[in-house]
Amino acid sequence: MSARAKQLSLRLASPPVFTRAAFATSAANERAVTLVEAWPRWPGGALALVGPEGAGKTHLATIWAERAGAVRYAGGALAEGAPVLVEDADTIGDEALFHLINRAASDGGLLLTARSRPTAWAAALPDLRSRLNALTVAEIDAPDDALLIAVLEALFREKHIRAAPDLYEFLLRRMERSVTAARALVARLDEAAAEQGRAVNRALAREVLEETADLFEG
């Protein structure tokens, strides 16, 4: 990676802000959004939100957590009586997951995220297996063109960038096809434009993509 690409990478240290306004929808995720927003009417109080890496699970889960006043599970015991968000739920262990699912309704909600459906999660406890198989699932598909364009448009608006219409097709043909990559790419374009005093256009995008080829391959 060039010195300039390293500099841009360092400037991405601040975490993204996951707002509802910045969450774009398309056929790839609209069903999942509807199910998540149906809280607190989830059957049994629990919902599994699944999809490939970079599809927007963390963004959607964060929107729900803020709306519900949920606490994030990070291992160990949790005080009862508040909704709970568990990311990468298929990795936390049988007993913890069994306990959280059992108290989901009384806690006011449990949102579990993972890359695969609960029926594919390992479960040594027979009772946990039956509960996982019965979970309602909200599935996000891999981002389609419509979703990626909507994401890019929303991110450019957040940065107050007026992007030329032909930039979107140019980026879609060259960037990694994920929401995570779109967010990082827009941040890099914004940084490069500010440093060089240039407009965000295809020429600048080509330079940024070339300098960060190890991060944006696809």
Image (spheres, helix red, strand yellow):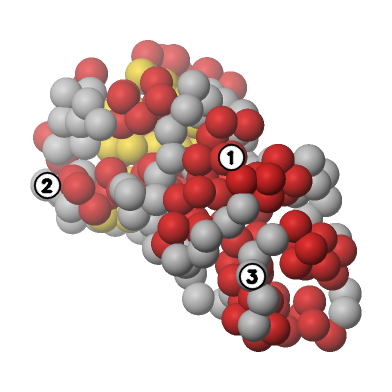
The residue at the point 39 percent across, 50 percent down is 22
Compared to residue 57, the image places residue 137 above or below, namely above
Residue nearer the viewer, 64 or 45: 64
Q: Position of residue 182 (x, y in %)?
A: 61, 52
Q: Which mark is residue 81?
A: 2
| Point 35% across, 30% down: residue | 33
* Quadrant of the rendering where the N terminus is positioned: bottom right
Which amino acid, mark 2?
Gly
Give yes or no for contact between labels 2 and 3 (Cβ–Cβ under 8 Å): no
* Residue 178: x %, y % from top left: 64, 43
Q: For the residue marked with disc 3, what is the amino acid?
A: Ala
Query: Which residue is labeled 3 in the image?
Result: 199
Q: Earlier in the sequence, mark 2 or mark 1?
A: 2
Which label sits in the foreground, 3 or 1?
A: 3
SS at mark 3 in the image: loop
Q: As shown in the figure, which amino acid type bears the numbered disc 1?
A: Leu
Q: CA distance from mark 3 to mark 1?
A: 21 Å
The mark found on residue 132 in the picture is: none
Is residue 52 among the parts visible in the rendering?
yes
SS for dot 2: loop
The residue to which callout 1 is attached is 148
Q: For the residue carrying disc 1, how many other residues have a C-alpha within 10 Å: few (<14), some (14-19), or many (20+)?
A: many
Q: Position of residue 135 (x, y in %)?
A: 37, 20
